[in-house]
Amino acid sequence: MPDQVCRVADLVSEPGHDLLSLGTQDKAESLFTRALAMKEADPGNERPDLVRHLNDLAGLNLTQGELAREEELARRSLGICRKIHGEPHSRTEESMALLASVIGKKAYSRNQ
């Protein structure tokens, strides 16, 4: 059953990337949110595919300026990556870079 949930979550989120490229962020956010909820409901969900769903939504929130929500998602993503992959690892480094960009954007917006 967990593998089926994973596949369905991937199918739900896939069109979100196309919607983003078309500029329909609200629809993409809806799909990313639903996919993430499916993954979070899956027992033992701290796997690399959860990280992808967290990063999809976090990246979208960054473009929309929802920095508090994005920081929360990016921190969760980094925690899972550290748990699964350890350091150094390319996935962990990607999650660190995402969190660093959020923190940098927050600092920049405070100074404006």
Image (cartoon, rainbow, N blue to C red):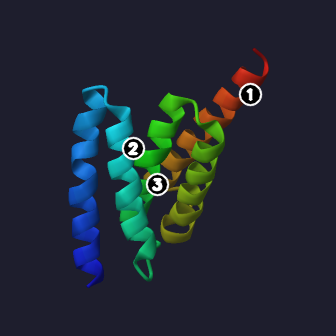
- Across the whole image, how many numbered discs are drawn on residues? 3
- Comparing 2 with 92, the one in front is 2
Q: Note whether residue 97 is visible.
A: yes
Point out residue 110 in the picture as x, y percentages from the top left corner.
Answer: 77, 24
Residue found at the very far right of the displayed protein: 111
Numbered disc in front, either 2 or 3: 2
Counting residues from the N terminus, which is met first, the one under dot 2 or under dot 3?
2
> Residue 54, which numbered label?
3
Residue at mark 1: 107
What residue is at 43 percent from the left and 75 percent from the top? 41
List the residue tagged with mark 2.
Answer: 29
Taking 109 as reference, is 21 left or right? left
Q: In the orientation shown, which residue stands out farthest toward the top?
A: 112
In this rendering, is residue 111 above or below 95?
above
Q: Answer whether labels 2 and 3 touch (C-beta < 8 Å).
A: no
The picture quadrant where one finds residue 82 is: bottom right
- Of the 4 image quadrants, the one containing the N terminus is bottom left
